Amino acid sequence: MLDVRAELTATVWKVVAEVGTAVVAGDELLILESMKMEIPVTAPEGGTLAEMHVAEGDTVAEGDVLAVVATP
């Protein structure tokens, strides 16, 4: 299991991927918004999106776990 963490304090603008979806490194999981900029959050490795810990509109802090990717 691999935690995907927030790199900055932001608001979750859009959740792109659904739990159970197969992902490859670089696939977009969600989009954060900070200071009117959209910041894509991508899968660091291939696997399956096992958990999504945020919903659209949530505020996250730097270091918060956003999602978990189950790696083979």
Image: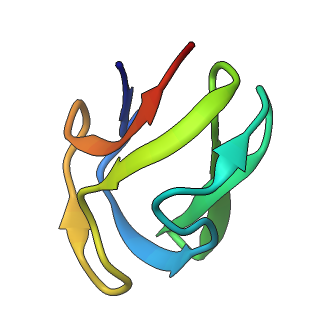
Q: Is residue 9 above or below residue 46?
A: below
Q: Specify whether 26 is left or right of 4.
A: right
Q: In this view, does 38 lie above or below 67?
A: below
Residue 40: image x %, image y %? 67, 53
- Residue shown at 29%/51% (left/top)? 9
Residue 39: image x %, image y %? 64, 55
In this view, which residue lies farthest toward the top? 72
Q: Nearer the viewer, residue 60 or 67?
A: 67
Residue 35: image x %, image y %? 50, 68
Q: Nearer the viewer, residue 22 or 39?
A: 22
Residue 51: image x %, image y %? 32, 51
- Residue shown at 36%/40% (left/top)? 6
Q: Specify whether 34 is left or right of 41.
A: left
- Residue shown at 78%/44% (left/top)? 27
Instruction: Choose top left, top right, bottom left or bottom right for residue 42.
Output: top right
Instruction: Choose top left, top right, bottom left or bottom right for residue 56.
Output: bottom left
From the image, which quarter does the N terminus lie in? Answer: top left
